[in-house]
Image: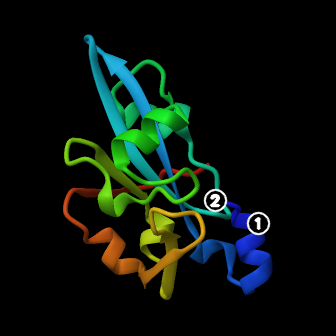
Amino acid sequence: ADTDALIADSGLDPADSVNCLVVIGRRDGRERIAAVCVSADLRADVNGVVRRMLEVRKATFMSMERATGETGMEYGGINPVGVPDDWRILVDSRAAARPTQIVIGSGLPRSKLVLPAALLARMPGVEVADLAR
């Protein structure tokens, strides 16, 4: 999604816009995949914290084609709500603790979902951790 344009057009605080990245790693011949959610004003520590949480030697971003194919969502709109059940959902603690509503992808880059930050943190399977540098 063009987060910079969204923030400029809406006046949204970047900390209230949450991006979802799809990260993959391998260990013992098995893929480990996570939807990683961090506020737009932060960068996910993919090869530090996220890599260690996935217990892999190297974590990388899943290819756009595969991520969109497996989620059924469009590039720029992927969100944690509809990812496959066997994916982990990792949410940065700062995004989960926002006192306001947050904005996440809707599955389409041209629209967004608005929800209380606490609701994102309480979704089934969500793990909240300090994921950003």
Say which of 83 and 100 sits in front: 83
Q: Amino acid at mark 2?
A: Ala
Q: Nearer the viewer, mark 1 or mark 2?
A: 2
Say which of 86 and 92 sits in front: 86
Q: Is residue 37 above or below residue 24?
A: below
Say which of 74 and 12 sits in front: 74
Q: Position of residue 118 (x, y in %)?
A: 35, 79
Q: Which residue is mark 1?
A: 4
Q: Position of residue 47 (x, y in %)?
A: 54, 31
Tell me how far mark 1 sits from mark 2, CA to CA.
9 Å
Query: Residue at position x 48%, y 21% from top?
Result: 58
Marks counted in the figure total 2
Quick one: label 1, few (<14), some, or many (20+) residues within 10 Å?
A: few
Query: Residue at position x 62%, y 49% from top?
Result: 133
Q: Position of residue 28 (x, y in %)?
A: 25, 11
Quick one: label 2, few (<14), some, or many (20+) residues within 10 Å?
A: some
Q: From the viewer's perspective, tell me whether residue 73 is left or right of residue 1.
A: left
Q: Which residue is mark 2?
A: 1
